[in-house]
Image (cartoon, helix red, strand yellow):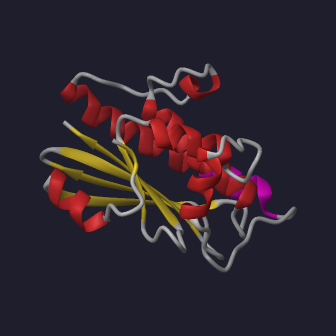
């Protein structure tokens, strides 16, 4: 499916038959990552990502798959969940106004699940980033991530393609 600039969360939730939503809070909107709080925020980021992966692996066990965040480091793009979480998270750490994701989201349903990585502060134009990645400008802000998002087998979409704050990843069983 790959990157979809016109796909909506409402449609994705209906497709998976969503029944439950969980949040994994990393930092408050009023709390940008600064030198004084970097260690605390990065610790919360790592903990939230571990908790999210635990939940995804519980879901995956029932469906015959698992994810391991090491797969991103090992450049194993077959683990799209690890790639999504690490690319989206790295883009927030490097390029978001507050330099960290605000929270992770997990919607579960009868036919799949949706992950979300939300940032605080200024939005970004997913549409412009996508166009840059299509031109193969991988040095651009988030370009490598967008190259992966574009070719992903799962659906990747945004809360608002022109002023995005949340990027979503959908798996249908």
Which part of the image, by quadrant, shows the C terminus?
A: top left
Observer-nearest of 74 and 66: 74
Let me know if residue 22 is in the magenta part: no
Q: Can residue 18 be seen at all in this image of the molecule? A: no
Instruction: Please state the horizontal and vertical placement of residue 101, each as a whole percent of the image.
Output: 60, 60
Examine the residues drawn in magenta and state their main secondary structure. helix
Which residue shows up at 77% across the image and 44% down it?
A: 139
Observer-nearest of 81 and 6: 6
Corner quadrant of residue 168 = bottom left
Which residue shows up at 61% across the image and 66% down it?
A: 27
Observer-nearest of 156 and 17: 156
Instruction: Please state the horizontal and vertical placement of residue 92, each as a whole percent of the image.
Output: 65, 57
Q: What stretch is highlighted in magenta?
A: 37-46
Instruction: Please state the horizontal and vertical placement of residue 74, each as a whole percent of the image.
Output: 62, 19
Let me know if residue 38 is in the magenta part: yes
Which part of the image, by quadrant, shows the N terminus?
A: top left
Q: Can residue 49 be seen at all in this image of the molecule? A: yes
* Relative vertical location of residue 122 with respect to residue 66 in this rendering, above or below: below
Which residue shows up at 71% across the image and 68% down it?
A: 98
């Amino acid at each position: 499916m790959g990157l979809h600039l016109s796909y909506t969360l409402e449609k994705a939730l209906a497709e998976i038959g969503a029944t439950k939503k969980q949040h994994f809070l990393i930092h408050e909107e009023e709390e940008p990552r600064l030198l004084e709080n970097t260690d605390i925020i990065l610790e919360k980021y790592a903990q939230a990502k571990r908790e999210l992966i635990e939940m995804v692996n519980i879901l995956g066990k029932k469906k015959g798959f698992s994810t391991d965040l090491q797969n991103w480091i090992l450049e194993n793009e077959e683990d799209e969940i690890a790639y999504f979480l690490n690319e989206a998270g790295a883009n927030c750490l490097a390029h978001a106004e507050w330099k960290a994701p605000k929270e992770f989201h997990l919607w579960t349903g009868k036919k799949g699940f949706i992950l979300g990585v939300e940032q605080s502060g200024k939005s970004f134009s997913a549409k412009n980033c996508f166009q840059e990645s299509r031109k193969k400008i991988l040095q651009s802000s988030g370009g490598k991530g967008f190259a992966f998002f574009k070719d992903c087998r799962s659906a990747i979409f945004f809360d608002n393609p022109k002023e995005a704050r949340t990027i979503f990843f959908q798996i249908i069983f």
